[in-house]
Amino acid sequence: MGKKKQQKLTLDSGKLKIGNNWNAITIIALSQNNPLKAIAEFVENSIDAKAKNITIIRGKLKGETYLKIIDDGEGIDDFIYVATHIGDSIKRKLKKQGTTGIQGEFGIGLLSFWTVGEELNITSTGKSGEAKRIKLIKNNPGYQIRDVHSLFSPTGTELVIKSILSGVRQLSGEKIQNYLASELRDRISRTGVKIKILDRTSRKEFLVEPRKFKGRLLHDIPAIRSPLGEIYCELYLNEPLPENQIGLYKLGTRVIPSISKIEHFNCYPWNSPYLEGIIDASFIQLTPGTRDGFIYDNAYESFIVSLDPLKDFHVSIIDEQKKAEDDKASKNILKRITRALQDAFHHLPQEEYSWLQIKPGRKVEIVKKMTSIDERNLSADPVYISKEIEEKSGSEQKEFFEIAGPLYSAIISPSSLIIGVGDKKKLKIIARDKSKRQLDSGYFVKWYVDEGEGVIDNPDKEFVQFSAPLEPGIISVGAIVTQDERECLAECIITVTKELINKDKFSGNSDGSSKKGLPGYTFQKAAGELWRSRFDTATSLIIINNGHADFIYASKAKSRKLKYIAKLFTKELVLSNFPEASRENLMERMIELQMYMEENLRS
């Protein structure tokens, strides 16, 4: 009984066989679903044949679209072997003999023409010096080989695909150029081959050059080693863009455009928009049909283990870049807020907002604060403050960019105010050029009362005094500024009332000091706490809670983050400088200051 069972097992074992050869060939031919990848394989065959010049022609002849690839390589010696050895490429034998730098080993690359067109014709001159042509037709198992007679024997190989499929006709010469520049980037660089595309349909010519990365090349990358072969890394640090990707290559040919498509690498930092470049692994096993993937075998395991040292390196590099960007963004935000506050100061009553005052003859620059923020248990983030510095005296010659241009706009300062009945208020005109630089001379002013009552003394001067009437009301004061043929109008709205807030209560800072100027800001992460910001009067810093949900939401967009921090500035400055005001008055002050600030933030 045991012998019969053993005999049965022996009879049931054997070798796998293809039941229908043509059905298998059809499956192989249709496994390539990317026509651009198919074109790249044809070009690679030319590179493997040691071609120095490759020309791709896209055109139309007698109503039939075609794609032609011409090279000056070594040519094909045996068309019969090519046609009758599907799945057994001669390149595999060359690799076993020690030949390096060639791609492909399955003998199925030519069948990918099925994804491009209906008919394939290859004309080539091998070592015999005789030109021959092979013809293959889609969905047809036969092939034809014949001699080609010409006055001059052609060199190299000419591949022509006729009757281009309707869905492939949209592949312009430019699209083919961009694809090959990335797909064959290193193969083009290493071999020095020149690839030219003649798009006769659009009458344009393109030269395929290896794709150049725009970021900063990373040096001192940790050594990457695998016992199975070489891994080459060329990585760049760039500004965060969604198109930044790290491509996976084999021997200079791209396998997949982004390594993050591999599950193991679909995580930080591999999918970070800061990194771009290539990782070339010479030993990974490609999927035979599509060649846009690989086999998850021992070579793959060795590959992912070998890349582990790069992870911490990339994290540190990206963190440094983010810190530098945050540093720059903080400086830029404070600069814009400072300018907005300076501009708001021209519109607001100076005696009520004296803490905004910038001393005459000085300007503001943004500098890093050299104080030990860590000792105050605030934050290690960069801290910037506004610092007043001396401007050049009038006797010194100004730089060209400091000289004001022609008149462009004018404002009255303050442009809105509240005064008591019968009170007097000084007003001034500020004439500006297109870049908001203030004009010192060369213009004329004419003041007038547009609506309501009131008296303006010296109405043709830059500085005037307005005398309010004895009855409450809303008064509109205007000024016409002229320079040559240019005329600008400015307006000031004055509210005359019998009820006034006691301004003496609200002058100075909450600690009784007369400290003026614009504060800086820093961050303190207090996740889960409800406060958004605080004003530290000792250091003149606004401390912002960057762990608050509102800050996290605002930080997702630069413009939103700027407006959010500007609102926090408005809140803290009003609270600090009007400590005894009622809730209603505080809200009025915040709306007043915020309105003039946001007007300048948009410019």
Image (tube, rainbow, N blue to C red):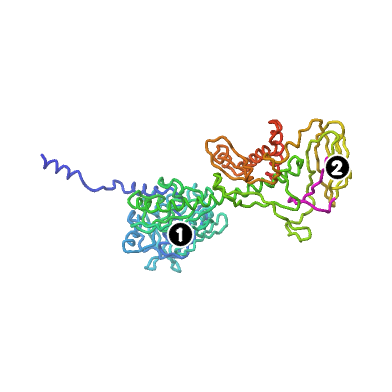
Residue in the image at 50% along x and 51% along y: 318
Image vertical order of residue 95 relative to residue 348, above or below: below
Image vertical order of residue 180 relative to residue 342, above or below: below
State which quadrant residue 44 falls in. Answer: bottom left
Q: Secondary structure at mark 2?
A: strand
Q: Earlier in the sequence, mark 1 or mark 2?
A: 1
**How far from the left and from the top, in percent, is residue 321?**
53, 52
**How far from the left and from the top, in percent, is residue 546?**
56, 41
State which quadrant residue 506 falls in. Answer: top right
Picture disc at residue 220: 1
| Stretch in magenta | 425-443
Picture disc at residue 393: none
Residue in the image at 37% along x and 68% along y: 128
**How far from the left and from the top, in percent, is residue 482?**
84, 49
Does 440 appear in magenta? yes
Residue in the image at 73% along x and 51% along y: 435
- Identify the residue position indicated by label 2 in the image: 465
Q: Nearer the viewer, mark 1 or mark 2?
A: 2
Residue 401 in view, yes or no: yes
Viewport quadrant of the N terminus: top left
User: Which amino acid, by three-letter code, is at mark 1?
Assistant: Asp
User: Which amino acid, by three-letter code, is at mark 2?
Assistant: Gln
Number of other residues with Cα within 10 Å of mark 2, as a class: few under 14, some 14 to 19, many 20 or more: some
Q: Secondary structure at mark 1?
A: loop
